[in-house]
Image: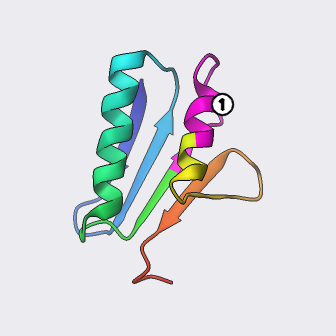
């Protein structure tokens, strides 16, 4: 389960991940991966503050592995398009 926020015309996507089940989590991660490669989203922020185990650490590790950077609080991961810098 996740909350996804996107404002039309603003090139940022916010995902707040809450709980994980195999199939739905796989679909979400595939969608986030697709957004990473699109030219429509310059920044993706994922919040894991409210996410529960099992699954939280696996998703956290996957996001870090595909290029998301840790925020200072350790609860958010962010990925910026190379166009943003």
Left or right of 72? Residue 84 is left
Q: Is residue 11 shown above or below 35?
A: below
Q: Nearer the viewer, residue 68 or 71?
A: 68
Residue 48 lies in the magenta-colored region: yes
In which quadrant is the N terminus drawn?
A: top left
Write the residue at 30% across / 63% down.
Answer: 37
Q: Is residue 37 shown above or below 24?
A: below
Which segment did they paint magenta? 46-61
Left or right of 18? Residue 71 is right
Residue named by callout 1: 57
Q: How is the image coloured?
A: rainbow
Q: Nearer the viewer, residue 8 or 11?
A: 11
Q: Is residue 69 visible?
A: yes
* Residue 64: image location, x then y, percent: 60, 51
* Residue 10: image location, x then y, percent: 31, 69
Q: Is residue 64 shown above or below 21?
A: below
* Residue 36: image location, x then y, percent: 36, 60
Write the residue at 42% across / 73% down.
Answer: 81
Residue 28 lies in the magenta-colored region: no
* Residue 48: image location, x then y, percent: 61, 37
The part of the image, by quadrant, that contains residue 39 is bottom left
Q: Is residue 10 shown above or below 30?
A: below
* Circle 1 Cα neighbour tier, 10 Å, few/some/many (<14 / 14–19 / ≥20): few
| SS assignment at label 1 | helix
Q: Is residue 50 visible?
A: no
Write the residue at 44% across / 82% down.
Answer: 84
């Amino acid at each position: 389960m996740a909350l996804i926020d996107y404002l039309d015309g603003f090139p940022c996507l916010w995902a707040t991940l809450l709980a994980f089940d195999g199939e739905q989590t796989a679909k979400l991660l595939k969608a986030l991966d697709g957004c990473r490669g699109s030219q429509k989203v310059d920044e993706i922020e994922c919040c894991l503050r409210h996410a529960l185990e099992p699954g939280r650490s696996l998703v956290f590790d996957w996001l870090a592995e595909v290029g998301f950077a840790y925020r200072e609080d350790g609860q958010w991961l962010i990925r910026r398009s190379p166009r943003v810098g």
